[in-house]
């Protein structure tokens, strides 16, 4: 009754399915990492594309697509890094506040998740109070701008990450 099964299973190209499964899993984790902290989302999507091209070069994904994805990875992280400072500026923050947000973000990287979230906020607030000589109200407003800007950066990073995944699959199956 199941005599066909060994022949059927031996005719499947398991290498192809394994590489595609690995690619899809890494890209899915990358998309999740775009909105979850501590997972380098766009970088993981870019890495999935490179691994796929190296393991299955005959699948039609070109190095031009990989280069585009590399550029989009840089754009995603650039947007993410600058968004808090731009948000602070949009809500009336000074240049000192923008510098504080950027420095707070860099220092926050060394303190894991709490530092990544709190670092830019504290940096912007402290620089507004100490160096820009603002009172509590405007400094808090600028800090709120950092929160809004960081949220917008998250949305933009997600859009760029979706564009990366879309360009990969378009190149693999259509172009």
Image: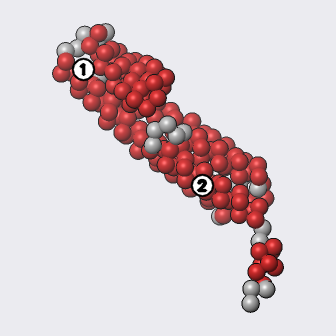
Q: Nearer the viewer, residue 23 or 128?
A: 23
For label 2, the SS is helix
Give neighbour class at mark 2: few <14, some 14-19, many 20+ (Cα, 10 Å): some
The residue shown at (50%, 33%) is: 78
At horizontal 46% and vertical 35% (from top left) the residue drawn is 80
Verify CB contact (< 8 Å) between mark 2 and mark 1: no
Point out the frontmost of discs 2 and 1: 2
Image spot of residue 20 (x, y percent) = 68, 59
Residue 84 in the image: state x and y as whole percent.
Answer: 38, 30
Q: The N terminus lies in which quarter of the figure?
A: bottom right
Horizontal relation, residue 155 to residue 134: left or right:
right
Q: Is residue 66 left or right of residue 55?
A: left
Q: Give the percent coordinates (x, y) of residue 70.
A: 63, 40
Q: Quadrant of residue 104?
A: top left
Between marks 2 and 1, how big is the CA–CA gap?
Answer: 43 Å
The residue labelled by disc 1 is: 139
- Residue 106's place in the image compared with 23, above or below, is above
**Can residue 132 be seen?**
yes
Looking at the image, residue 124 lies above or below residue 66: above
For residue 45, side relative to residue 140 (left or right): right
Residue at image position (60%, 50%) is: 26
Residue 163 visible in the picture: no
């Amino acid at each position: 009754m199941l005599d066909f099964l060994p022949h059927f299973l031996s005719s499947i190209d398991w290498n192809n399915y394994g590489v595609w499964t690995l690619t899809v899993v890494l890209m899915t984790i990358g998309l999740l990492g775009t909105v979850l902290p501590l997972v380098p989302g766009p970088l993981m999507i870019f890495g999935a594309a490179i691994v796929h091209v190296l393991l299955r070069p005959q699948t039609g994904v070109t190095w031009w697509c990989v280069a585009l994805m590399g550029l989009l990875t840089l754009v995603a992280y650039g947007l993410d890094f600058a968004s808090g400072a731009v948000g602070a500026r949009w809500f009336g923050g000074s240049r000192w506040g923008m510098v504080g947000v950027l420095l707070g973000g860099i220092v926050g990287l060394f303190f894991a998740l709490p530092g990544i979230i709190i670092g830019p906020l504290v940096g912007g607030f402290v620089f507004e109070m100490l160096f820009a000589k603002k009172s509590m109200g405007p400094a808090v407003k600028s800090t709120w701008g950092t929160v809004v800007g960081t949220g917008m950066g998250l949305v933009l990073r997600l859009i760029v990450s979706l564009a990366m995944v879309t360009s990969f699959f378009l190149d693999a199956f259509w172009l």
